[in-house]
Image: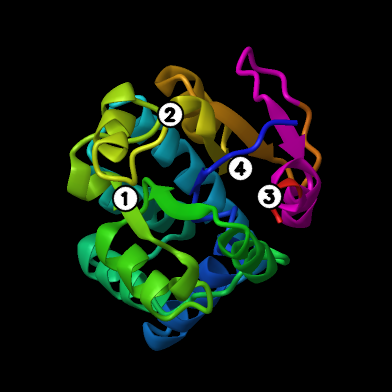
Amino acid sequence: MKNYDVFLFDADGTLFDFNMAETNALKIIFKNCNFKFSDDILAKYREINIRAWESYEKGEISKSELQVIRFERLFEYAGIKHDEKEFNDMYLYELGKGSFLIEGALEICKEIKAAGGIIYIVTNGILATQEARIKHSLIKDYISGYFVSEHIGYQKPHKSYFDYVFSHIVPAEKEKIIIIGDSLTADIAGGNNAGIDSCWFNASCKFNDTDITPVYEISSLLELRNFFVNRQL
């Protein structure tokens, strides 16, 4: 196994429990708007949101369009009448409060920093939301910086996104940098495009039916100890 000096962590679904934050935010907004919330509504929203983010990653739509489209399609499905942008703004505000962590995230961040590693967050999420979540999280003291696509002007998996990241982090050879994330199309493909090693965080043990190949695959963040951390202590 190789030793790494710089760890680029995805945020949602890797360090942060986005599903919990998302569910909590939607429940609050639906209640405040006097709309009926259900498991069916949640499942449909997630289906729509995933497709919208995939379109964004491919450059087919902008992030502002993504934020409106997902609720337009959900409201059409549910028969809801409401201003989509206003609803999205309320949703992002509540989402920013949701700094719930994935199991093992706090421990692994502590251990990486104690071992001399440097941690950065690389995310395609919404800038204001991600800043709020990081600021209020238990891992904030272990993070040396974060890079949000909305601020950079490029998103994962594009090489230009990573070129920007590399120019703003502690100088390190690419052989000493690794990206860890749950998305094959954004994180792992991004690592491949950038010429760095990648680790697919596959908590649900999904089958990889793509041609995107990670260097490593884990189902628990604590498995990173076996790959990297213990070798540095």
Q: Nearer the viewer, residue 140 or 172?
A: 172
Question: Which span is picked out in magenta?
Answer: 208-230
Label 1–label 2 contact, CB within 8 A: no
Which mark sits nearer the N-terminus, 4 or 3?
Answer: 4
Residue 170, horizontal then vertical, whole percent:
34, 46
The numbered disc on residue 232 is 3
The numbered disc on residue 224 is none
Residue highlighted by disc 2: 173
Residue 33 in which image quadrant: bottom left
Residue 62, horizontal then vertical, whole percent:
22, 38
Q: Tag 3: residue type?
A: Gln
In this rendering, which labeled residue sits more in front, label 4 or label 3?
3
Indicate whether 199 appears above or below 73: above
In this rendering, which labeled residue sits more in front, label 1 or label 3?
3
* CA neighbours of label 2 inside 10 A, class few (<14), some (14 to 19), many (20+): few
Q: Tag 2: residue type?
A: Glu
| Residue at horizontal 44 percent and vertical 33 percent from the top | 54
Which residue is the extreme one toward the top? 211
Which mark sits nearer the N-terminus, 3 or 2?
Answer: 2
Indicate whether 56 appears above or below 148: above
Q: Tag 1: residue type?
A: Phe
* CA neighbours of label 1 inside 10 A, class few (<14), some (14 to 19), many (20+): many
Tell me the quadrant of the picture where the N terminus can be found: top right
